[in-house]
Amino acid sequence: QVQLVQSGADVKKPGASVKVSCKSSGYIFRRHGISWVRQAPGQGLEWMAWISLYNGNTNFAQKVQGRVTLTSDTSTNTTYMELRSLRSDDTATYYCARDRHPLVAAPYYGMDVWGQGTTVTVSS
Amino acid sequence: QSVLTQPPSMSAAPGQKVTISCSGTSSNIGDNSASWYQHLPGTAPKLLIYDNNKRPSGIPDRFSGSKSGTSATLDITGLQTEDEADYYCETWDSSLSAVLFGGGTKLAVL
């Protein structure tokens, strides 16, 4: 079945970087883009960024632009999200989510499969 | 403060119907299709509605969606205790070139 499996929880100090992985299975990896969405404690869902696995195009939320890098490894069907210069308000559960519609130019059409979430705690 | 406005909380009794609204603007809901997600604590969000009113396979027909102008709506009929969750609307914003989520609605089934 279609599945996204994320890396485990992580604890980082302020100013450090974190890299979260998202391994896809059960579908043709390059056909569907991947978004990254986070939820801080007590807050709602917040979209962060998106990557097309077909052509490498990306979109970023203004709030994190410049601190986030998205990459992928087609040999392992894995997508990565690196967040730099971590602050306490980056403490959140981070989700990867697959585009519902294949081969789109941007994440227009919703997300149909989600990873289990990765908790990142930023604390000194 | 989310660009997409949802009521923070709602409650209804089992068996009743609830309508969750999502208010946006011409550059987001007015220009693009809306999706709805159900989110239970400690689990991954689940897609309930896409393209304003379509259900993925496996989603009961108790869940339905609609869109009018710059607002989208999620209806849940025949409420069950397991429907107690957070519900989020989502769409693309053509001006911001970004995905937007509503602030979320916490539904209590009492």
Image: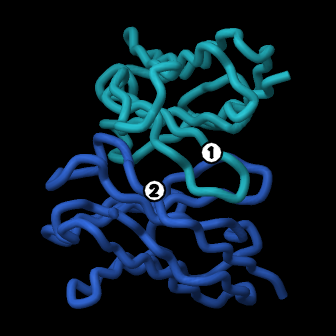
Chain colours: A blue, B cyan
B22 sits to left or right of B107: left
- Quadrant housing residue A93: bottom right
For the point 65% across and 80% down, the residue is: A86
Please report, as a chain letter, where disc 2 is located.
A
Relative side of B14 to B62, left or right: right
Residue at image mark 2? A61
**Residue at 71% in and 75% down:** A87
Residue A71 horizontal/vertical position (percent) = 32, 81
Q: In the image, is B48 to the left or to the right of B83?
A: left
In this view, the residue in front, A29 or A72, is A29
**Which amino acid is tagged 1?**
His
Up-down: is B57 above or below A68?
Answer: above
Identify the residue under disc 1: B39
Quarter holding the C terminus of chain B is top right
Which residue type carries mark 2? Ala
Name the residue nearer the viewer: B20 or B12. Answer: B12
| The quarter of the displayed image where residue B2 is located | top right
